[in-house]
Amino acid sequence: MKIKPDIYVAERDRAVAVQTSSKASLDRSAAEQRRAHEMSAKGLISNSELEQANTSYQVAKAAHDQSDAALKQAEESLRKTTIYSPMDGTVSGLKVELGQRVLGTSQFQGTEVMTVADLSRMEARVDVGENDIGSISAGDTARILVDAIPEKKLTGIVYQIGNSAKTKGLGTQEEVTNFEVRLRILDKDVVLRPGMSMTATIETETKSNVLAVPIQSVTTRSQNKDKEKMEAPSPDEMAANDAKIKQKNEKPKEVVFLVDNNAAKMVEVKRGISDDSYTEIVSGLQEGKEVVSGSYKSINRELEDGVKVKVDNTKNKTAKTASK
């Protein structure tokens, strides 16, 4: 791309003329300085005349150096009227047409002329919440779903994680803090365009051949459900209550409910990694057991140990409905 160079050509030509004039003046001053030194050696001129010749030479040399710098600046400005793309790619956005004025100075932001994209090396940019950013590392695998290509999931890798937060709704109840994560898309057989909408799932850890249950089947229960007495406690009871309070402050245990003789059986488990649908069970559960699943209200609030359950196999999908 070229910016009309007429003004810059004129500035370059003027700088060349000034440099030529200053070079002639420098040569003349140099000759006069040499002659003054020869005459001073023979005692034909005074010291003040010799000093004047030296000063004239220094002034001419400074003027020549200044003209050299001005010429270099003019040539650099002229060179920048021809603009080359810093990368091989495709023009994906053209903001300025032939003949339009543009601004380009070192003091102000210039005019955006065009956007060049390397369509052979596409990347996806996603915002990750501050609670999850700590578990993401460069090199993690990502599964990317582009809205325009819903039938295929693309594969990418994390290659850059933002150091500064992006905050939306600062000072309001909707305040959200995210970090930008950039994903390099590895698939080369799909045609993507800059600006396409997408969603990504970043795999921070991967395990194979693990025992897993639906994520909604795992819930929590308090470790102590004894009801507090209404009457004034005795000293011994107060000590016992203190122990109960300490126990209540402990972290609730994670449990799942199994189907055992048409009844729910609560089993304490330890979870591992999770995705959107399933969670790994590290200990507390054996493969092949029937696990109760259902709505959040049923599993987390209503279901208790020993409650009768009914197995429902409708729609080729096994579900367990709790009933009292």
Image (cartoon, rainbow, N blue to C red):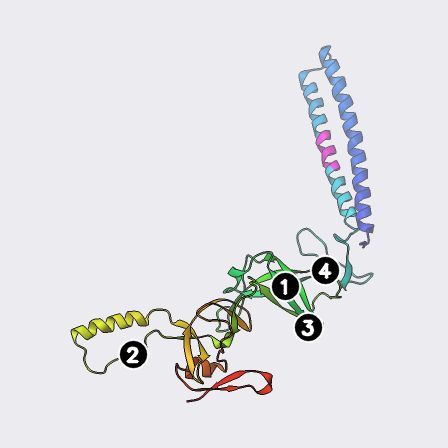
**Residue drawn 38% across the image and 72% down it:** 252
**Residue drawn 72% across the image and 26% down it:** 57
Query: Which of pointers 3 and 4 lies earlier in the amino acid sequence?
Result: 4
Query: Which of pointers 2 and 3 lies earlier in the amino acid sequence?
Result: 3
Residue 68 located left or right of residue 308: right
Magenta stretch: give its range. 60-68
As drawn, 166 above or below 290: above
Which secondary structure type mostly characterizes the magenta part of the structure? helix
Which numbered circle lies on residue 125? 1
Q: Identify the residue under disc 2.
A: 226
Point out the image quarter for the N terminus.
bottom right
Q: Is residue 65 magenta?
A: yes
Which numbered circle lies on residue 112? 4
* Three-letter residue code for mark 3: Asp
Of 113 and 210, the residue lying toward us:
210
Residue count near mark 2 (Cα–Cα under 10 Å), binned few <14, some 14–19, many ≥20? few
Cα distance, mark 1 to mark 3? 14 Å
